[in-house]
Amino acid sequence: MALFTFNDDSYTLGNIREVDTRKVTILVNSDKDLRKARVGQLVTVQLSGASECWLIGMIDKVIKAVVTQPLTLEVPEDDADEVDAFEDSVVNTVKITLMGAARWDAIVHKYKFSRSLDHVPEIDSTCYVLKDAHLEEFMRVISECGDGEHSLELGSYKLNENARAYVDGNKLFQRHAALLGSTGSGKSWTVASILERSSQLPSSNLVVFDLHGEYKKLSYAKQLRVPGPDEVDVDDNSLLFLPYWLLNSEEIQSLFVDRSEFSAHNQVVVVQDAITEQKKAFLKANDRTDLLQSFTLDSPIPYSLNEVIGKLKYLNEEKVDGSRGPKNGPFNGEFSRLLVRMASRLNDRRYGFLFNSPDKYNQYDSLSMIAEKLMGFGNQKQSIKVIDFSEVPADILPVIIGLVARIIYQIQFWTDPNSRRPVAFVCDEAHLYLPRKEGNPVERRAVEAFEKIAKEGRKYGVALMIVSQRPSDVSATILSQCNNIISLRLTNADDQATVRKLLPESLESLLEALPIMDVGEAMVVGDSVLLPSRIKIDPPTEKPLSATIDFWSRWQEDVTNADFALAVENMRRQNRIKP
C-alpha cells in the first residue's frame, strides 16, 4: 500500500538535478509549479525501486534566476564581422533539506517515520509537495509514531494544527534539553506545561530552581523556599535551610577567603585543618568513629563554625616564647581580615539559612532529612519540587544553587542502581548562575558543579533542562551537552548565533524563523523529536506568575496613590507584609 498517490500534476514540483548528502536541488519546469513552493513546506520523493519508502524534505530556499547565455547566429562566409548575441532564460530552482524517510513496517503493518537516511534520491526523480490530504496523512504518521508510552505531548504542529506534536520523554531528559527564548516569548508557559504533564506520572521527579517565585502557585508541586532574614527562627516544613557544613572546601573558600591577599594560602590551609578537626570531634561525640578511616575534608559532616573561628582568633593573636621574651606567633595578624569577613557573613541575617539554621538541621541524620525534602517522590505533592531562591542574596546565589545540585547529584551517585530514581533539574534563568564568562570564584563553583552533571549526569539518572532568555550568556560547555533544543522567539543576533552552533548545518534554515515566531510557538530540534519543526505549545492549565504588566492599560486606570509606607516596611523587613 502506497503512502501517497499523486494522480495529477497539481502536486508535482519538479525533478532532482543535484544531490549532496542531505541537500537536494530541484529543477522546476514552470512558474506555475514554482508557485507551489513555500519555505518551510514539506516535500517528498519516492525512492526508485522502493515503492514503500518515501523521502521527506523541507524547502529551504525558492529561487527564480535569470541566466544569460551566448546565442549562436549563422552569418555569411564572406562577412568578416562577428555577431555577438545573447539570450536570457529563466531557471527555477528549489533547495530542500532531507529530514528522513517514511517506510512501510511489515511487522506492525503501517508506515513509520525515521530520521535515518539509508539512500539518497536519484537524479531526475520527481519531487512532490505535501499539502491537503497528503500532508494530513503524513502528519498522522508522525503523530502515531510519537504517541507511545514514552511520549510527552507538547502541542500541535504549525504545518498542520490537527496533528498533535509529541517528543520522546526518555530522550528529552536523557540527552539534556535547553529551553530558550526572549522575554515574553512563552518560556514560563512551556516550562509549566511540561511540569503539568510530568506531574501526572506516578513517580516523576523534577526539581525546579525558581529565582523569581514564578512557579510558587502550582498546586501539584511541593513548594520549598529558602528562608528570608526574618524567618530564621520559623518552624515551617516548607522552608529549606542549607546549613554551612554542607559546603565543600572550595565553596567555603569562595565565601570567606580573598585570593588576592598575601596570606590567602595560609588562610586556606588553617581553615581546612580547623574544619577537619571539628568534623572529627563531631564523629567521636556521636559514636561514629567507624567513619574516621574514610571521611575527608569535603564529607558532609556537621561541625561548629564558632569553634573554627575561635581557633583562627587564637592563632591570629598567638604569642610564643622567644630568646628575648614573648614574640608574635607564626600566624599572628594574618587572619584579621578573614575574621572580619567571617563575622560580617555570620551577623548578616540574609545568610541566616546558612549560618543560623535550627538545631534539627545540624544533627548527624540531618542530611537524610534534607535529601528527603529535595528528592522525595511517589505522590503528586512530592513529584515536582519548586525551590524558591528569591530570598537568597545575589552575591552567593550561584554557590547555593550549585550546592543543591551537587547534593542531589552525589546522593544519586551513591544510591544503589536498582533503587535509583531519575531526577531532572529545571534551571530557570540559567544565565544568572551558569555564566559563560565566570567573573568570580562564587560563579565558578556553580558552573563546575553543573558542568560535571552535564557531562556525566545521564549515567546516574540526573538530567538538566536549561531555561534562559540569553543563551549567549550561558556556559558553552553546558549548552553543548544539550541535545534537545526548544527555542521560542529569539530576537538577539548573538543568541541566534549561539543556537545555530548547537545544531547541525543541515537544520540551519529552520532557525531563520526564530525572530518572527509568535508567542508560545517553538522550534523543536533534537534527539527527542521525530521531525524537527515548529510547534504551537499548549498553554498549561495552571499559569505561572510571569504575566507581563500592561503599562499603557494600567496607566489609563484612575487610581489613588499607593501605600508607600507599607512598601518601605517590606523593604526593611525583606518580606512582603499583607496590608
Image (tube, rainbow, N blue to C red):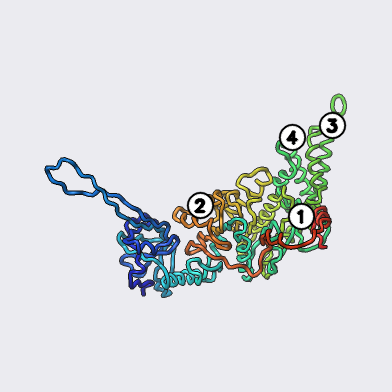
The residue at the point 67 percent across, 43 percent down is 440
The residue at the point 66 percent across, 66 percent down is 543
Q: Mark 2 falls on what kind of element?
A: helix
Closer-to-camera residue (241/275): 241
Q: Earlier in the sequence, mark 2 or mark 1?
A: 1
Which one is in front in this view, the residue at disc 4 or the one at disc 2?
2
What type is the residue that disc 3 sits on?
A: Val
Percent of width and height locating residue 108: 43, 74
What type is the residue that disc 2 sits on?
A: Arg
Q: Earlier in the sequence, mark 3 or mark 1?
A: 1
Q: Which residue is mark 4?
A: 263
Which one is in front in this view, the residue at disc 2 or the one at disc 1?
2
Q: Residue furthest top?
A: 324
- Looking at the rendering, which quadrant does residue 310 occupy? top right
Q: Earlier in the sequence, mark 4 or mark 1?
A: 4
Task: Locate residue 202 relative to residue 97 in the image: left or right.
Answer: right
Q: Which residue is mark 3?
A: 320
Judge whether residue 357 can be spotted in this image: no
Q: Mark 1 falls on what kind of element?
A: loop
Q: Residues within 10 Å of mark 2 (few under 14, many from 20)?
A: some
Closer-to-camera residue (422/311): 422
Q: Residues within 10 Å of mark 1 (few under 14, many from 20)?
A: few
- Indicate which disc residue 288 carries: 1
Q: Residue furthest left?
A: 78
What type is the residue that disc 4 sits on?
A: Ser
Quote the CA–CA distance across marks 2 and 1: 54 Å
- Looking at the rendering, which quadrant does residue 92 occupy? bottom left
